[in-house]
Amino acid sequence: MLSQLADHYRIINPSPSDAVITQRSESIVEFLKALSEPSIRYSCVEVAMTGFRTTISDDQLAMANLLTECIKGKQPSFASAVAANAMELRVCAAIALSEYISSSDEAAIDVAALAIAAAGVRPLPEDRPLAALVEQILRSATTRLDTSGAARRKRRPLPIPNITGGDAPTVAKSAEIAVKELKDAVTSHLMADQEELQILWWVFGGHSVTLAKPFKVLDAGKRAVLAGFELATRVIVPPTSNARQFLLAITAPDAQLSVQQIAQAATTDVIQPLKLQLKDCAKLITSNPATMPLAWLFFRRLDSGMAGGWESEFEQKTQMSSQLKLGVSAWSEQIFNECVAGKIVSEAMTEQ
């Protein structure tokens, strides 16, 4: 996307000079180095996909200041005030995010998943060029996850053990390596087979494991939350793009629900297991709530003893209307995307 910087920069300036485009391009390349730090790249996702909050958070400010310093390194006259350059910083963050998602860095998988969760059900920006930029990031993120997901599920031929060596220690070491390679290959095959079986049994059974009840007897809000959560627990991450189709079989009929109705349906017994699964992402959800808006709402509800009065805080922190109405399947897919993103982020934390 860096090659298209001049086109996207017209969101800010309809006639940018070549010098400005060169400066911004070099600044974004410099900023990309900072995305190895999780808190910076997660804030980059939030700002790129949803913009700055009215009251800029500490994490957003830290990311914005770092990006501003990269720009000032190429253009010293660039203003330091984040609020004065909010849209320009968002566009630069979005281009950096797209470049990072398309890179070979394995850590890019978590930001790809978060970008999809952050954009999710929220309407695209009214500004058409900005909406096109967000859509382009989503396409890159989807492609990245699909490619990674397909690679994890590819059933390669099992390796034939090749044991070599002229003495006992060498033969033993060679045998150890060969057995490990065979074990890893078999495990990979079994995981892919197990995923398929678990999902098929879950879909055809039509039974919520969380509440030990058929999905068809649950109200629409509970179906939305539990279908997305329970499917996410059964998929290898990243999931295949068609995994979401299984939600349609569970969530029908597709009634329209608001965020408020989802919150009312998400009782303690429904969302406590979800919070437990996302416990490693608690800091991310608190610091960058717009990346996982429904997870933030569920955490907020549980932490407050299911108290009401969350609407204003929800809208301020997630930049999503509490009056937003969508179908059950759309809400379920959003919860699925957030849980998948949480699993991928948790894996990334474990590997660090």
Image (cartoon, helix red, strand yellow):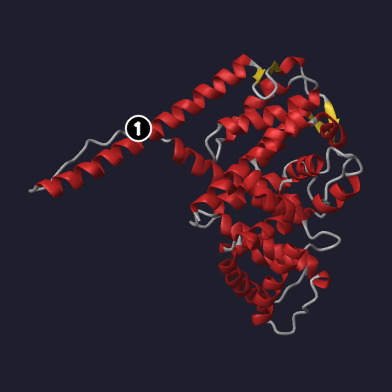
The residue beneath circle 1 is: 186
User: Which of the 4 quarters of the picture holds residue 78?
Assistant: bottom right
Indicate the position of residue 249 as horizontal and vertical percent values. Answer: 67, 20
Q: Nearer the viewer, residue 337 or 151?
A: 337
Rendered view: 168 above or below 197: below
Please, is residue 225 above or below residue 305 in the view? above
The quadrant in which residue 344 appears is top right
Q: Residue at x 72, y 34 (%)?
A: 272
Q: Is residue 334 left or right of residue 176?
A: right
Relative side of 82 to 159, left or right: right
Residue located 72% across and 66% down the image: 9
Residue situated furthest bottom in the rendering:
76
Q: Nearer the viewer, residue 164 or 143?
A: 164
Number of residues whose C-alpha sits closer than 10 Å to that of mark 1, classed few (under 14), some (14–19) or many (20 or more)? some
**Label 1 residue SS:** helix
Horizontal side of residue 13 vs 143, given as left or right: right
Residue 257, horizontal then vertical, whole percent: 84, 30
Q: Residue at x 77, y 78 (%)?
A: 80
From where the camera sits, is residue 329 visible? no
The residue at the far left in this view is 166
- At horizontal 72% and vertical 23% (from top left) the residue drawn is 251
Query: Residue reaching furthest front?
Result: 305
The type of residue carrying mark 1 is Val
Rendering coords of residue 70 (x, y %): 65, 76
Q: Quadrant of the N terminus?
A: bottom right
Q: In this orientation, does residue 319 appear? A: yes
Quick one: 247 or 267, which is closer to the camera?
267
